[in-house]
């Protein structure tokens, strides 16, 4: 009994050591659990100097999902569990974020990123697809749809960035006044500050995973600032990219978004002739994480309706 107690105490001590001092192994364990819950697997794709990290799962028509600033494909793990019965989910880490790697310097304006995603999809042999994105990812999605409208069956935009004429959010009021940019994470305190901006009811995030995500973002803070500047100063406004995009589009916005003002919902929908809108109450900047079920169900219903309409129109031709 004494030996078993010693072993148990040793295991508890090791767990505490990992939890407090060496978060990376436990963080990887939690990320694996998130993938399993989302029924996703990792796929590495080498293409033109990029080693893409892609989360993929499910069955059906391809649904490409693009994450936001300082995010990665794991942002869609919770909705993927619900989407996978209807779509083949493909969630890459955009260059500059997550675990996609490359050599040298890149241009990070949204059109350059959109071209890279198109090249990735060419490598995967995917011609036509549904396309979604959150925040920066929604901005890139609109740039991609502008570059190759014939390939995009429908758009799913969740709190998309890039609107130049929208009301300033609490976060961007600080940025425009020259204050601290919460999107550029330089330490663990910055990461917590960004979480506070993003959620009304933050999901539980294990401390080792939070520390690993914060440390990863901090290691690339200088690059994140470069990407932010490229998006802010060297990218076409979302209004220009979205105006006249004549494809089915569902625009979702959290009513309590403090990162991008929810007034953008109406402003963006007026640019897109086939847009439908959904304002989600008591929800922040990341509806697919904070409210995964209603977010996924809204898209499934919308996409099925758009597909039926497309079939009817094709039959009439």
Image (tube, helix red, strand yellow):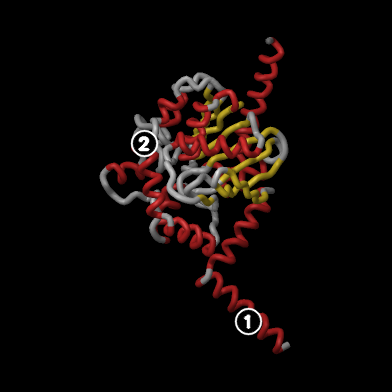
User: What residue is pinned by disc 1?
Assistant: 9
Q: Pick the residue in front: 161 or 203.
A: 161
The vertical placement of 231 against 273, above or below, is below
Asked if residue 137 shows in the view, the reply is yes
- The residue pinned by badge 2 equals 234
Q: Residue at x 55, y 24 (%)?
A: 149
What residue is drawn where x is 48% and y is 41%? Answer: 282
Side of 84 relative to 196 (left or right): right
Residue 277 lies, in percent from the top left, at 52, 28
- Counting labels gives 2
If the image is split into quadrants, where does the N terminus sit? bottom right
Q: CA distance from mark 1 to mark 2?
A: 56 Å
Relative to 135, say whether 99 is above or below: below
288 in relation to 244, above or below: below
Please give left or right for residue 295 compared with residue 254 in the image: right
Residue furthest to the top in view is: 317
- Tell me if mark 2 has few (under 14), some (14-19) or many (20+) residues whose alpha carbon lies within 10 angstroms of its own: some
Return the residue found at the far left.
Answer: 177
């Amino acid at each position: 009994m004494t030996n078993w107690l010693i072993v148990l105490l040793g295991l508890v001590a090791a767990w505490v050591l990992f939890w407090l001092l060496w978060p990376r192994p436990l963080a990887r364990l939690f990320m694996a659990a998130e993938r399993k819950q989302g029924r996703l697997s990792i796929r590495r794709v080498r293409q033109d100097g990029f080693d893409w990290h892609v989360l993929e799962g499910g069955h059906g028509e391809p649904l490409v999902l693009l994450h936001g600033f300082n995010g990665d494909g794991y942002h869609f793990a919770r909705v993927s569990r619900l989407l996978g019965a209807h779509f083949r989910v493909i969630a890459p880490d955009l260059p500059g974020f997550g675990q996609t790697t490359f050599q040298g310097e890149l241009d990070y304006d949204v059109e350059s990123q959109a071209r890279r995603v198109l090249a990735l999809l060419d490598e995967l042999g995917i011609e036509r697809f549904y396309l979604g994105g959150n925040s920066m990812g929604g901005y890139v999605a609109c740039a991609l749809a502008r570059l190759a409208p014939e390939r995009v069956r429908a758009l799913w935009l969740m709190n998309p960035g890039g609107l130049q004429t929208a009301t300033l959010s609490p976060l961007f009021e600080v940025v425009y006044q020259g204050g601290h940019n919460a999107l550029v994470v330089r330490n663990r305190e910055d990461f917590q500050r960004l979480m506070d901006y993003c959620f009304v009811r933050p999901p539980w995030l294990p401390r080792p995973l939070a520390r690993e995500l914060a440390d990863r973002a901090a290691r690339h803070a200088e690059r994140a600032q470069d990407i932010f500047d490229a998006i802010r100063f060297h990218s076409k406004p979302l209004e220009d990219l979205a105006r006249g995009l004549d494809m089915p589009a569902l625009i979702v916005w959290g009513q309590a978004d403090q990162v991008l003002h929810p007034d953008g919902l109406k402003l963006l929908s007026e640019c897109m002739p086939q847009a439908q809108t959904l304002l989600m109450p008591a929800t922040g900047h990341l509806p697919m994480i904070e409210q995964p079920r209603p977010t996924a169900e809204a898209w499934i219903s919308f996409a099925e309706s758009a597909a039926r309409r497309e079939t009817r129109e094709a039959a009439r031709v």
